[in-house]
Image (cartoon, rainbow, N blue to C red):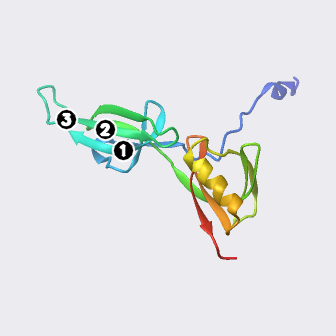
Amino acid sequence: MSDDHHDDEHFHTGDSGAAATFPKQCSALRKNEHVMIKGRPCKIVEMSTSKTGKHGHAKVHMVAIDIFTSKKLEDICPSTHNMDVPVVKRREYLLMAIDDGYCSLMDPESCEQKDDLKLPDTELGQQIRDAYEKDEGSVLVQVVSAIGEEAILGWKVSTKE
């Protein structure tokens, strides 16, 4: 008998094993928390709960803003059902350079470089570019990540050296 059958096994490697979302009951969600609506990570801006109807479930109506696109999304969910909540992480990076619309960033703690984030094509992006070109201190950008997406969503100037 041959041991060649092991050559046919394929192992798929995943990420760190941390889930991109976790379930949370609709009635436990609150304004300013994050929730997944139509597959997008959103921040809840309005919530209302209807009374229990003759068919048994109180409904939760949510209005939320996509954290990456700023689009307004709505959802209605029975209060006893679960919804997915995205794991949202925020990190600050030092802006080293802006090259061809992409930011060269450095993690101030680990000194690791990150070159794959685009400067936003919005007023925020222009503010970051202006602050970087003025050279009045180190420009720190806030990078938000959720469900495998990352974007620059804020900035500040640090004058301490």
Q: Position of residue 101 (x, y in %)?
A: 72, 43
Residue 161 sits in which quadrant? bottom right
Q: Can you see residue 152?
A: no
Q: Which residue is found at the position 31% from the left and 35% from the top?
A: 81
Q: CA distance from mark 3 to mark 1?
A: 18 Å
Q: Residue at x 38, y 38 (%)?
A: 83
Q: What element does badge 1 sit on?
A: strand
Q: Which corner quadrant of the image does residue 137 belong to?
A: bottom right
Mark 1 is surrounded, within 10 Å at the Cα level, by few (under 14), some (14 to 19) or many (20 or more) other residues, namely: many
Front of the two marks 3 and 1: 1
Left or right, 4 with respect to 152, comes to right
Circle 3 packing at 10 Å, graded few (<14), some (14-19), many (20+), is some
Q: Which residue is mark 2?
A: 62
Foreground: disc 3 or disc 2:
2
The residue at which mark 1 appears reads as 44
Say if mark 2 contacts mark 1, CB within 8 Å. yes
Judged left or right of residue 125, residue 39 is: left
Q: Is residue 77 visible?
A: yes
Residue carrying label 3: 58
Q: Amino acid at mark 2?
A: Met
Q: Say whether residue 161 is left or right of residue 18.
A: right
Q: x%, y% of residue 5?
A: 82, 24
> Taking 140 as reference, is 51 above or below it?
above
* Residue found at the far bottom of this picture: 161
User: How far, Cα to Cα, is label 3 from label 2?
Assistant: 13 Å
* Residue type for callout 3: Ala
Which of the two discs, 2 and 1, labels the residue nearer the N terminus? 1
